[in-house]
Image: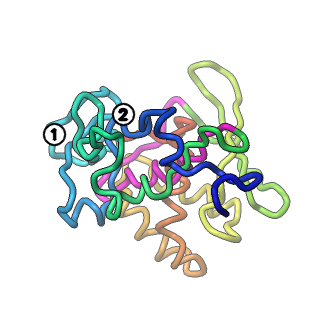
Amino acid sequence: MEPGESGAMPLCLELIAHCSAMCCRMGGTMLTPDEIASGQYETETFCLKKKELCDKDFECYHRIIQCRTRTLVCVYLGEDDRCGIYERRPEVCAGFSCGFGGPDGRKKTIYGERDMMRLSAGMSFSLNPSVRLKAVIAEPGRERVFLLYRDRELCVDSMASVPPPWPGATDEQIVEVFLMFGGGKLLGDVEEQARAHFASAAGDASLGVRRLVVACLREKLLLPCHC
């Protein structure tokens, strides 16, 4: 759809005069593993927990590799507020829709996908000892799964809504994958165990486990073992 047509999202270049490329001034752009391995970007390691650059070399859920910045501004942003590497801009940039002036005025970034980009097989996670999973309830159509859990510190029950690890995953399988992290396990080991144990979901097991990990981290049902 061409700019100016009814319902069309304004093009990025049409908005720069209003936003001054704000999306490029909010910290570094997260890079995918393939983009990091390509060596075509200037990078830095950032800690999402401490909100500062990190010089540690171990696997950690809070660490991301991003495009290098200067006082939170992407190093590739030019003085004209345009991207200096637009033709080879990172995947996150290419898929970003700021929603500034758009139909609903809201950002459309899918944070679950960004969270999964932070995961690697060498990271380890553990069940939160202060939380006990009580029940797993799948909604009709199994598009969402509800986890009922007890927060022992607050003495209250809470409900979390998560996507199923893979199409057709049973309640028992979801609980079993969750419990595989008991005692603290490497993500890669749990993925391998899930692939071997659930033959019908072998092709989706790795993605499914990571999707479940992200959802459980958000609800603090799982905890990263390294900080």
Whole-percent x, y for residue 160 in the image:
67, 40
Which mark identifies residue 25? 2
Task: Give the image location of residue 34, x and y in percent.
Answer: 30, 66
Quadrant housing the C terminus: top left
User: 106 or 118, which is in the foreground?
Assistant: 106
Q: Which residues are magenta?
A: 105-130
Asked if residue 112 is positioned above or below residue 195 in the image, the reply reads above
Q: CA distance from mark 1 to mark 2?
A: 25 Å
- The disc label shown at residue 99, or none: none
What residue sits 61% from the left and 18% below the top?
154
Query: Where residue 102 appears, x then y in whole percent?
Result: 66, 43
Q: Secondary structure at mark 2?
A: loop
Q: Is residue 198 left or right of residue 4?
A: left
Q: Residue at x 15, y 45 (%)?
A: 57
Three-letter code, disc 1:
Lys
Q: Is residue 45 left or right of residue 182?
A: left
From the viewer's side, name the closer residue of 112 and 89. 89
* Kind of residue at badge 2: Arg
Q: Residue furthest right?
A: 140
Frontmost of labels 1 and 2 is 2
Which residue in the structure is indicated by mark 1?
56
Residue drawn at x 48%, y 33% is 19
Crowd class of label 1 (few under 14; some 14 to 19; many from 20; radius 10 Å)? few
Q: Residue furthest front?
A: 4
**Lower sequence index among marks 1 and 2:** 2
* Residue shown at 55% from the left, 81% from the top: 199
